[in-house]
Image (cartoon, rainbow, N blue to C red):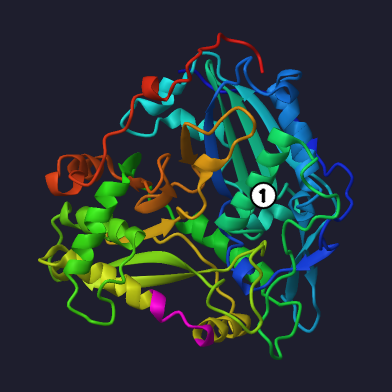
Amino acid sequence: MEAVKVISITTIRARSCLKNGDSPEKIDLNPWDLQYLVLGYGQKGLLFHKPSSASSSSIHRETVVEHLKDSLSSALDFFLPLAGRLVVVPRGGSDDAYSVFITCNNTGVSFVHAITENTTIADILEPTYVPPIVSSFFPPGNIKSFEGTRVPLMVVQVTELLDGIFMACSMNHCIAELKPYWNFLNAWAQISRNGLNHIAPNSKLASFKRWFPDGNIERPITIPFRAIIENHHLKESTNTTQSPPFSRRIFHFNRGKIAQLKTKANSEIQDSVTSNKISSLQAVLAHVWRSAIRNQNLDPEDEVTYRFLISASSRVSNPPIPDDYFGITVQFTTVTMKVRDLVGHGGLGKFASEMNKAISSCTEEKIKRDFEAWVRNPTMHTQHATIGKFMTTSSSPRANFYNLDFGWGRPVAVRGGQANAKQWKLMADAGAEDGSLDIELGASYEILEALARDPEFMHAVELPRSPAELSPSSQVGRTRL
């Protein structure tokens, strides 16, 4: 495998800038958006086989890269905020009182076309661990969301491989969470595959107006922006401790194994409140977290904490959050347990039950209370530094990236970007087969190897298919896209 070479960088703007649907000229951000200002961009990448001559004629007539640029421009007509920028303005009354909004000025998104001459799909899929070159398929991951005042809110990179293409998308973390992120990619894929004939010019594909609870919250929200950024830079400059190296590995769970874990977790619960309420995802996350802790041989009295996301979308009704809401609705919550309770007898069910209770406690009243508390005392989400005793989960199988078809078939793999890859971070995505899950785990090489040697853990894991099994019936030679 060789280095990735950038061929071109192009600014893509909305084709007609018609303000389809309810596209506003500006969007005042709410606390759910603002709490991500110091985090990097959200990143997902899709690995495809190279389109063959059997692909749809509309794509075959032109190069894939130019076709993607053209269809992206059309898609931005319906998601105009993505082509905008963040704006920070002083509010007065204080030396450090600022509000932040998105200006929908069609400044454009960045489209990077790159190539790696001799890298193949097999080079990506065959290694046990995610190979380092995958990070090169994504736009630079060191950009923070507050920098959206000067850099695009979305960056796309399309990298040509010898026998495939890798499409990566980075989106400012303040703009949207995973579901609307997927909705945009799906709209783009539909336009790429079918053109605009199936979308009316005034269609509303997303609701951009930010949610606020009914009440007396003054808008726009005011935050100490300079202090937040200075504190972030101070933490980065004073953190001289070298982060320990870590690797990333994908563990695949098929529908049958997931069902077994769910049954086991529910059978271990004695609490009538959460009995038989453990979901498939909760069971798998409990299995991975429990196994990761068990393989560290920690003190049984140590406390370990697991952080995960809960969506507020279905939990608030006054006012309700639209189904097509394009913004942030997820809230972080944690479960803390002693090691002995987690890894001991019945630990799978105990942890899954605690997750279930934490989710149930996320009521509309609590969501609104936390929302209003943030306005009074703004805080930023940051990456937790405690290695081995704290894990964060992101992504969600509810957004199935394997269903995205730009006109030449489904992806053969989905990967997260380096900006999202952290030590002791777990990303849970839908797998290629119905009902399956792909768990990408970032941890030390030693821990990942210990998991691979752990028969209790691996009993639930399915070995990956070879690239040959994923190959299309007709192979194509090397051609420039």
Residue farthest top in this picture: 477
- Mark 1 — residue? 184
* Residue 374 drawn above or below residue 396: below
Residue 84 showing in the rendered view? yes
User: Does residue 384 appear to the left or right of 389 in the view shown?
Assistant: right
| Residue 238 picture location, percent across and down | 47, 58
Residue farthest front in this picture: 198
Bin the neighbour count of mark 1 within 10 Å (Cα to Cα): few under 14, some 14-19, many 20 and up.
many
Residue farthest bottom in this picture: 216
Residue 147 in magenta?
no
Q: Amino acid at mark 1?
A: Phe
* Residue 360 drawn above or below residue 460: below
Q: Nearer the viewer, residue 243 or 86?
A: 86
Name which residue lies at 55% across and 19% down: 116
For the N terminus, the quadrant is: top left
Name which residue lies at 58% across and 82% down: 377
Residue 302 showing in the rendered view? no
| Residue 330 picture location, percent across and down | 53, 67
| Residue 249 picture location, percent across and down | 33, 39
**Residue range (magenta):** 359-365
